[in-house]
């Protein structure tokens, strides 16, 4: 796992370079690139229509670069087993 400083102007070139490296498996995406990268990767899970931002890119079995978002699953998983029907609930956060 490594890190790379990618500017907004260099995002498209970065993705194209990674696309050409078969051993490259993926990356995390941080602001300000979470929206812009949607135009540069495949979106088979309709992240654009659902969450609207990508935080993870992975290489699919066919070599395609796929954008996804792990935030929703990370938020939902601990709540999924709870019976909150009729319970007062507050969601507090300052994330994107």
Image (cartoon, rainbow, N blue to C red):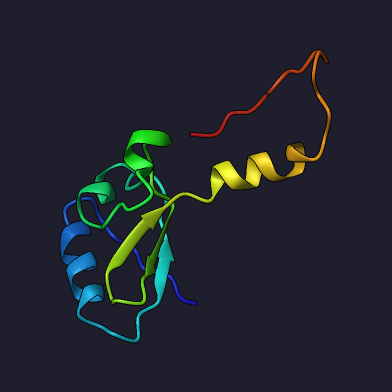
Q: Is residue 71 left or right of residue 91?
A: left
Q: Position of residue 37 (x, y in %)?
A: 27, 51
Residue at 32% from the left image edge and 39% from the top image edge: 48
Q: Is residue 14 left or right of residue 34?
A: left
Residue 71 in the image: above or below residue 51: below
Residue 74 in the image: above or below residue 93: below
Residue at 74% from the left image edge and 39% from the top image edge: 80
> Residue 60 is drawn in which quadrant?
bottom left
1, 46: nearer the viewer: 46
59, 8: nearer the viewer: 59
Count all numbered tags in the image, as a single digit.
0
Q: Is residue 84 left or right of residue 43?
A: right
Q: Position of residue 65 (x, y in %)?
A: 29, 66
81, 28: nearer the viewer: 81
Residue at 68% from the left image edge and 23% from the top image edge: 91
> Residue 27 is drawn in which quadrant?
bottom left
Residue at 43% from the left image edge and 70% from the top image edge: 3
Q: Residue furthest bottom?
A: 23
> Residue 10 is drawn in which quadrant?
bottom left
Q: Position of residue 51 (x, y in %)?
A: 43, 36
Q: Position of residue 42 (x, y in %)?
A: 26, 57
């Amino acid at each position: 796992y490594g890190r790379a400083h990618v500017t907004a102007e260099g995002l498209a070139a970065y993705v194209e370079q990674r696309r050409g490296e078969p051993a490259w498996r993926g990356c995390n995406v941080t602001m300000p690139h979470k929206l812009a990268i949607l135009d540069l990767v495949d979106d088979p899970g309709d992240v654009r229509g659902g969450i609207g931002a990508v935080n993870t890119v992975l290489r699919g079995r066919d070599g395609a670069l796929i954008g996804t978002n792990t935030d929703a699953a990370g938020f939902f998983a601990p709540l999924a087993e709870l019976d909150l029907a009729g319970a007062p609930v507050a969601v507090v956060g300052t994330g994107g």
